[in-house]
Amino acid sequence: MVSKTNRIIRDLKGQSFEPKTPIATDMYLPNHSGIASHPEMAGEKGFVKKTGDTMTGGLHIQTGNIGATENINADELILENNDHGGLSICTPNDKICTIAFGDPEDTAAGRIQYVHSSNTLRFQTNGGTLALEIDSSQNFDFQTGNLSTTGIITGVNVTSAEDPGHTHTSASAPGAVTSVSGSTGAVVDGDIDHDALANFASNEHFTQANITATGTIASGTWNGTSIGTAYTDAKVTSVSGSTGAVVDGDIDHDSLLNFVANEHIDWTSTSSNFNTSGTGDIGGNTIIGSTTVNPDGTLHVHTATAGTITASNAADDLIVENSGSSGITIFNPAANIGSIFFGTPTSTSDGRIRYDGTVRDLAFSTGTTEKMNISINGEITSTSQPAFLAHNSSIDSNVTGAGTAATVDFDTEIFDQGSNFASDTFTAPVTGRYLLSTSVRYSGGSGASTSTFIFFISSNRIYERLKLPAAISSDGLNLSAVIDMDANDTVFVRLIVNGEASNVIDINGGAVLDTFFSGCLLT
């Protein structure tokens, strides 16, 4: 079912002319993306309005507020102005303009038509039957119907259908007209007083007052079928209002050729698919802010040109362009959240950038889970950034001393953010630069040791620290480095003590962290 608003706009959008009133700054075009919608766009209502007024009806176009309430039986299209108002239907000069009145049995039971090729205005009833036609010379043709009125016609000449060559101009013995009949409205009466018309019955004639809604008939010839009076339309010289005044010395409403570019919507620039329905849909590429620039994408907000530049077709759904600084603003109350979502058919919030107005922090989410947060003071936290700390919880006895390379045991994790540490080894989840640090406490020597080495054994290279002399029974050694790792590279710690007769060196461990290994991703 086509909505009321969509049906009206669909009929308008195919024309190549421009609307008469500058509406670019006052048009609310709602959308269904969730980015913005006007609070008054409810149900089947579409409107062009002045900010602050309450709109009603199917489509309400307001230039000025007259403070009146529309008739509920005629509120599908409302045109409101606190000055002169009007509706224009414009077509090429070989086409017909039509206002149709329909019902379920006949979608055009009644019509008002203007035929441009002959400059004729037609009124049709009963399924399109022509009842009245006014030609280019303002002659009235009442077709097969009878003409009746309660008024008086003054200052015209009447030609009888029975004697079309004779025009009555006076009568010496005025008498009442008793009947008017004929297929073309012929006057059948032997004595018509054309001077005073005082004896015409009230329901037989038009009064001048009944015609003044569209102009006064000062003179002309009425031959029974038409009134021959020439009318000319005057050009609008100025249109003003509290907002968006049109200042143009001569607006030609017939040809629309001298409208300046910044006063109106250019339908060619907004593409042939500029459609607005009751739910706020816009089809085709659209530009806002220019009538001369073609849009680079679906919606192009153009304040000023940024130069010779074209948006990437991978990101041209919404384009914001300016010759200076440009940006997009999201407003919401302080107690609420503003968000940008990135969705897929399986997850409408797979990615998200979120600003919380209550605590004033900025958060970034991937895979529907928050991964990074920037506080109001600038602290950055990341719940998934790789980081670990593990230690040796008990003594490992007789592991080195005579040159044996001992892999240091770190059997207890303090934390393992990202779950990347296992079996004394850290595995890099992503390629990057990692800060690693270790400290190893050892004991049990006889004092004969000559050297002690501690190593980071990584997939890419080996990092070493040497301690000399080493002729002591117990000691400790530490090592720190920023190392490069590829995704899935590994690193572990190794200790070698030389000089003892056998492997008598123990690696200490316990509740106190005297032997530990830690690391995190830097960049």
Image (cartoon, rainbow, N blue to C red):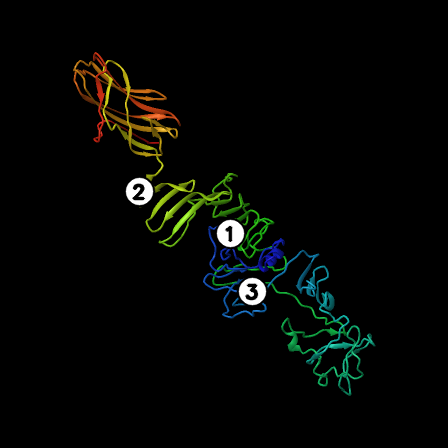
Q: Quick one: 327 or 511, which is closer to the camera?
A: 511
Of badges 1 and 3, nearer the viewer stands: 1
Q: CA distance from mark 2 to mark 1?
A: 35 Å
Q: Position of residue 22 (x, y in %)?
A: 53, 57
Of badges 2 and 1, nearer the viewer stands: 1
Q: Is residue 263 above or below residue 392?
A: below
Of badges 2 and 3, nearer the viewer stands: 2
Identify the residue at image location x=53%, y=66%: 81
Mark 1, residues whose alpha carbon is within 10 Å: few (<14), some, or many (≥20)?
Answer: few
* Mark closest to the chain's N terminus, 1 or 3: 1
- According to the picture, the residue beneath numbered tag 1 turns out to be 32
Element under disc 1: loop
Q: Position of residue 467 (x, y in %)?
A: 21, 18
Q: What is the three-letter code of the residue carrying label 3?
A: Leu
Name the quadrant of the C terminus: top left
Considering every residue shown, the one lying at the far bottom of the view is 173
Asked if residue 37 shows in the view, the reply is yes
Identify the residue at image location x=67%, y=55%: 92
- According to the picture, the residue beneath numbered tag 2 turns out to be 378
Q: Quick one: 333 or 457, which is closer to the camera?
A: 457
Identify the residue at image location x=24%, y=29%: 393
Label pair 2/1, CB-CB below 8 angstroms: no
Q: Position of residue 386 (x, y in %)?
A: 34, 33
Q: What is the three-letter code of the residue carrying label 1?
A: His
Element under disc 3: strand
Asked if residue 153 shows in the view, the reply is no
Q: CA distance from mark 2 to mark 3?
A: 53 Å
* Mark closest to the chain's N terminus, 2 or 3: 3
Label pair 2/3, CB-CB below 8 angstroms: no
Q: Position of residue 52 (x, y in %)?
A: 45, 62
* Mark closest to the chain's N terminus, 2 or 1: 1
- According to the picture, the residue beneath numbered tag 3 turns out to be 79
